[in-house]
Image: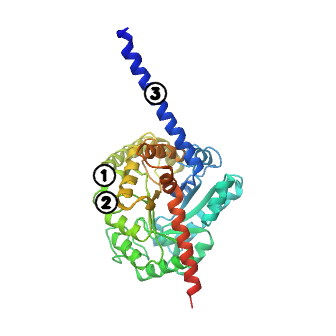
Amino acid sequence: MRLWFAPMLLLGLLTACRSQEDRLLERARALTQQFILIDGHIDVPYRLYRLPEDITGRSELGDFDYARAKAGGLDAPFFSIYLPSNLQDIPGASKQLADSLIDMVASLAQQAPDKFMLARSPSDVRRAHQEGRIALLMGMENGSGLEGELQNVAYFYARGIRYITLTHARANQICDSSYDTVRVWNGLSPFGEQVVHEMNRLGMLVDISHVSDSAFYDVLRISKAPVIASHSSARHFTPGWERNMSDEMIQALAAQGGVIMINFGSSFLRSAYQAIGDSIRQQLQAALEAQGLTPDTPEARRWLGQQRKRYPIGTVADVADHIDHVVQLVGIDHVGIGSDFDGVFALPEGLQDVSMYPNLVAELLRRGYSEADIEKILGGNLLRLWETVETIATQLQQSAP
């Protein structure tokens, strides 16, 4: 009896553990379907601009398509209208690309109105959720699309843009970038201050991801409404990396009612992952060249898109650690999700596309987060902030001379 009793006991314990994990994941899946799930930043439009593909069903490449989004419970992705910084050197090019990408998103909603709808407000997001459709939101990544003209803030608001990431990889006419060693303005430019005021007046969210630390504090100093970090994480885990937010910045953001939306990109999660990602990228680039594929061609992009998912870096727990850190610093009301799907090279195991949000929810449940907490993280915090921004805009418009 004793010879087989111990293995049988172990097998029973393992089965019970698996059963418990299965129930936890099932509960997590149910919560992602029940609650409104907003992702603050997904780079679908530029991905399709570079390599067209039908995403109204199940697509071969990328991190987002309709089928996977529904499986993961995603209700409202902010599609990034991404404008590369090199276009700043060509007058009119950034605005032209922005218009093209906005047209692409609009055509997607027209092509599959039973699956997608363009959304411009929190009420639109709620209606789409009730109807079982995915609300397509748009945020402009890089204020270079304004081309230095203040009236273009209202122009893009009318086109459906609901946040502007003030800059990207280089300083632009609005402010300095966290990625740029050249600090042109030492924060916000005079034009940048006008842009923030106009965004407040219109009810457009100000996004401080990518901006320099000085620009961040300038924004907080002058903004009349709370602001977001649409796809940033905690610098606590990546010391010295300005692209993530320091504890002091997270506290200042929260003090004004803001929300930081945690980036899933591996390089945002741990300093050690940045070197690993760089090494894998270099190896893939060498393999690409060995096949005779020319970089930045459709064939090369397709091959790299297929290969990158073979090399996950990090874990779901890493992302949850960032959420934990923010909650411990400033409370549950100031954190959300901004995955950067389709915009980063490497992602963690278990969070490699939009079908996998339940894995993160399951990890949060393991850590003792309540369902009310999870509802806030998935979308409730951003909806509250957005409604506050709209209320402030109404007040500013009514008080205008």
Residue 70 visible? The answer is yes
Tell me if mark 2 has few (under 14), some (14-19) or many (20+) residues whose alpha carbon lies within 10 angstroms of its own: some
Q: Position of residue 102 (x, y in %)?
A: 61, 64
Q: Position of residue 55 (x, y in %)?
A: 62, 49
Provide the residue designation for mark 2.
241
Q: Identify the residue shown where x is 31% and y is 60%.
A: 241
- For label 2, the SS is loop
Relative height, residue 35 to residue 181 (above, below) = above
Residue 178 visible? The answer is no
Tell me if mark 1 has few (under 14), some (14-19) or many (20+) residues whose alpha carbon lies within 10 angstroms of its own: some
Q: Quadrant of the N terminus?
A: top left
Provide the residue designation for mark 1.
271
Provide the residue designation for mark 3.
16
Q: Of residues 176 and 17, which is closer to you in this image? A: 17
> How far is disc 3 from disc 1 in space, using C-alphas?
36 Å
Q: Quadrant of the C terminus?
A: bottom right
Disc 2 and disc 1 in contact, CB within 8 angstroms: yes
* Mark nearer the viewer, 2 or 3: 3
> How far is disc 2 from disc 1 in space, using C-alphas?
8 Å
Question: Which amino acid does the dot numbered 1 rest on?
Answer: Ser
Question: Which amino acid does the dot numbered 3 rest on?
Answer: Ala
> How far is disc 2 from disc 3 in space, using C-alphas?
43 Å
Q: Position of residue 181 (x, y in %)?
A: 31, 68
